[in-house]
Image (spheres, helix red, strand yellow):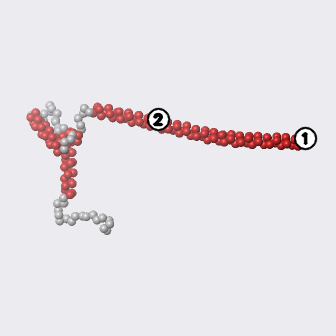
Amino acid sequence: VPERLRASSVHLAWLAAEKEVQELEKQCEAQQELESRIKLMRNRLKAMRKGAAARVDAVSKMIEHRKAELLINNEKVRELEGRQNEPPPYPALTNAQPLGLALTEAVKEMRKRALSRKREESNPLSLKQPASWPSLYSIGDLWLAKAELEHALSWRLDSCPTDRAQPQRRIQSPELL
């Protein structure tokens, strides 16, 4: 085999080997890129799993909290349903009448009770029957009416000075000072 052909065949073999090396380097780079992507994907997957677990925990805690609220609310509803048959504690506040009407009704009720006690009890010192007091409702109505009247009186007295000789205090705005 002549030298020239041998050289050209060596050269061709060298060129083929060079091409093969370049292809292998490209494959190696592609494989390294895939491995780095796989690492990124694995890290993302771990983060997604952690996030999903945290969301599941948060949702389960929220569900437990809502269940506890529901139990408390059901208990309150049962309690309110049980109280429906009871009379209201302050009828003057629950009915739509003005406080003055409730007050007159309370006074009438107290008078009726006082009259009925006078008729029934011949001996007030007798221990056969327990002492009768005005109802708590009428006392509450009187107490509320008293507070309302005191408030109205204090407002009226504050708005109308009785002594005109006293100088009225006026507040100056800071801009005028």
Kindly report the distance in space between the C-alpha atoms of the residues bearing marks 2 and 1.
Answer: 85 Å
Nearer to me, 76 or 48: 48
Q: Position of residue 49 (x, y in %)?
A: 55, 37
Residue shown at 52%/37% (left/top)? 52
* 134, above or below 149, in the image: above
Do the numbered discs 2 and 1 sit on residues whose CB atoms are within 8 Å?
Answer: no
Instruction: Tell me which corner region of the image, top left, top right, bottom left or bottom right, holds residue 117.
Output: top left
Q: Position of residue 67 (x, y in %)?
A: 41, 34
Name the residue furthest right.
2
Residue 16 at least partly seen: yes
**Picture disc at residue 128:** none
Q: Position of residue 122 (x, y in %)?
A: 9, 34
Tell me the quarter of the image containing the C terminus. bottom left
Judged from the image, the secondary structure of the residue bearing numbered disc 1 is: loop
* Three-letter amino acid code of the residue under disc 1: Pro
Which residue is labeled 1 in the image? 2
Total of numbered circles in the picture?
A: 2
Nearer to me, 90 or 94: 94
Disc 2 or disc 1, which is closer to the eye?
1
Residue shown at 82%/41% (left/top)? 12
